[in-house]
Image (tube, rainbow, N blue to C red):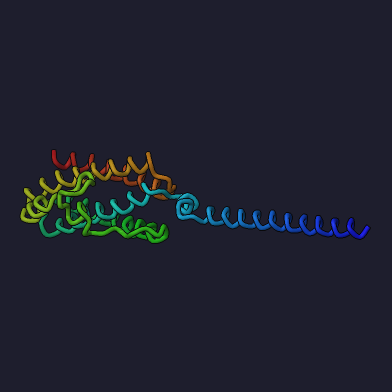
Amino acid sequence: MRKSLIGFGVAGLAAVALLAGCGSGDDMAGVQHSSTAASPSAKGQQDGHNEQDVKFAQDMIGHHQQALDMAAMVPSKSTNPKVTDLGKRIAAAQDPEIKKMNEWLTKWGAAPASTSMPGMDHGSGHGSMPGMMTAGEMAKLNGATGAEFDRMWLDLMIKHHQGAVEMAKTEQEKGSSADAKKLAQDIIAAQQAEITEMQTLLK
């Protein structure tokens, strides 16, 4: 009888150990699951953005900045009130958009746009962004005045706007952030309308 009780006790201890082992395994699985849920790769999906959204914001900030640089030339060089008015409207629209995209990059924990990146330093010609002016084009534009400046500025700004529209369409196709895709749609609508306006002014 004593042997039976001893055997029962040993079996009971083994069962407790087995249950404890299973509990430990479940706990570890829970830790692993929690770690996976908090992984950086999942963070972007939780925030509702992807790599395309980050690229769109970084690139469009540089693109907009060059448009602001071009618009800043207009008051002292243009002789056409309609061109002067358009330059003011472009600056008024794009400066707030730059601020908005910088806020997104901060919220997303992404690197800020850098004006030293190829294709962003007044259009070095080495970047991949469509519509950016080269340094030579910017220098030539800066050296023009009057009607010559107006024609050159309109030609270059049309090209610049067309590049922005292309970038915005890519964002709509591949982006994930609802806010970024909404801005892309706004850019397409506004800049296509300005392209039509500039083409009319050239005529």
Q: In the image, is 146 to the left or to the right of 45?
A: left
Is 47 on the left-hand or right-hand side of 8?
Answer: left
Residue 189 shows in the view: no
Q: Residue at x 32, y 60 (%)?
A: 112
| Depicted 159 relative to depicted 142: above or below | above
The front one of 42 and 110 is 42
In the figure, is residue 161 to the left or right of 136? Answer: right
Q: Quadrant of the C terminus?
A: top left
Quarter holding residue 58:
bottom left
All told, the count of numbered labels is 0
Q: Which image quarter: residue 17?
A: bottom right
Q: Is residue 90 left or right of residue 80?
A: right
Q: Residue at x 45, y 55 (%)?
A: 40
x and y, in percent, of residue 39 in the image: 49, 55
Closest to the observer, 189 or 41: 41
Q: Is residue 148 visible?
A: yes
Residue found 35% across the figure and 46% down from its top: 184
Where residue 83 appears, x then y in whole percent? 17, 50
Q: Which residue is found at the position 89% from the left and 56% from the top?
A: 4
Q: Quadrant of the N terminus?
A: bottom right
* Residue most extreme to the right: 1
Q: Position of residue 202 (x, y in %)?
A: 14, 41
Q: Nearer the viewer, residue 173 or 187?
A: 173
